[in-house]
Amino acid sequence: MRKRNRLYYNSIIMILALLLGAGCVFYGFRAYERGKTPESVSTLQEEQTGQETGADSQEEQTGQDTLTVHFIDVGHGDAALITCGQHAMLVDCGKNIKGRMVSDYVREQGVDRLDYLILTHPDNDHIGGAPVILEDFPIEKILVSSYAKESSEYELLKGTLEQNNLETRVPVPGEEYTLGEAVFTILGPVEVFEDSNNSSIVFRLDFGERSFLFAGDQEKKAEKALLNQMAANAEIDVETNAETDEEANTETDELSYKNLQADVLKVGHHGKNDACGKKFLAAVDPEYAVISCGPDEGDIEPEEKLLERLYDSETTVLRTDEQGTIIVVCDKENLTWNKGME
């Protein structure tokens, strides 16, 4: 009987001890919670979630502060993707057989819409891939050359535009457009030409302290007209496109052609000798020249005489036929090229 009583009393004591201990823990936890201020709770939440938010903000800010230009390797032809923050534009689309490749490349860069599509002139190696782009991406503005060409590629382009109820605009020299924090200005053509190449849209893209000049396929005839127009605007008369160092480098010319000056020149007409004359090159005075080129029915490009002009001007030459797709990132002050292209 005593053994049973001892067991009974011991059980009661253990139950009371457990209840007392649980009460103390509960009370202590409540006291700890009451002791926390709203600020400390907020700080704890920030510690748990703030790192992800901060990373996203930093990534977004970095994107807004940089401009990236992709000179896509499309063989003989042109296609350049330009992004600035959440904004993007495509300049030309390569040949018709390159349309899908260009579209896929643009997608791979995280671009699902375009602020601008610029079709500099209606040659196949610039507009051929455009119908694919028009079908694959919503596009806010489409800028085209005024030149109309009789070709199956041009007819297909017009048909695709009509089928999708898309409007185009022929830009006028002097017009400015924004791409995020970047601005591009239409420079040419300044005259009406009877051929496709010289009717190319020419524009300069400015971002911070850096600038890029896209020359389409303009040849020396259009270069001369552009130089004369700029000189006339500055009330300075210039002669024909000089081909001597003495004529090509004068202080007066530098003042006249300040709107042509650029750090990076997308060389006209794939490096053919009929483009990028000495006076035009002196006016642009680029640090880098990018040539989008490749085999073209047996033609050799870029041509040696043009390369000599670039080398003589101490310009760094980059070529898609040798280096593939060329990418440069600009942070408003510095230019960073993909590895091995500095």
Image: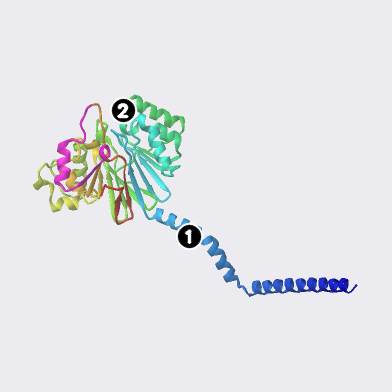
User: Does residue 154 belong to the magenta stretch?
Assistant: no
**Would you say 227 lies left or right of 168 here?**
left
Amino acid carrying mark 1 in the image: Gly
Above-or-below relation of 311 to 148: below
Residue under numbered circle 2: 149
Instruction: Determine the CA span between mark 2 and mark 1.
Output: 52 Å
Quadrant housing residue 73: top left
Above-or-below relation of 148 to 60: above
- The magenta span reads 298-322
Instruction: Tell me where residue 99 appears, x and y as whole percent.
Output: 38, 32
- Pick the residue in front: 82 or 176: 82
Residue under numbered circle 1: 54
Above-or-below relation of 314 to 36: above
Color theme of the render: rainbow
How many labels sit on residues? 2
Q: Residue at x 70, y 72 (%)?
A: 25
Amino acid carrying mark 2 in the image: Lys
Residue 218 visible, this angle: no
Q: Quadrant of the N terminus?
A: bottom right
Instruction: Tell me where residue 42 appears, x and y as whole percent.
Output: 57, 67
Q: Residue at x 61, y 73 (%)?
A: 36
- Pick the residue in front: 30 or 25: 25
Task: Give the label, 2 or 1, closer to the camera.
Answer: 1
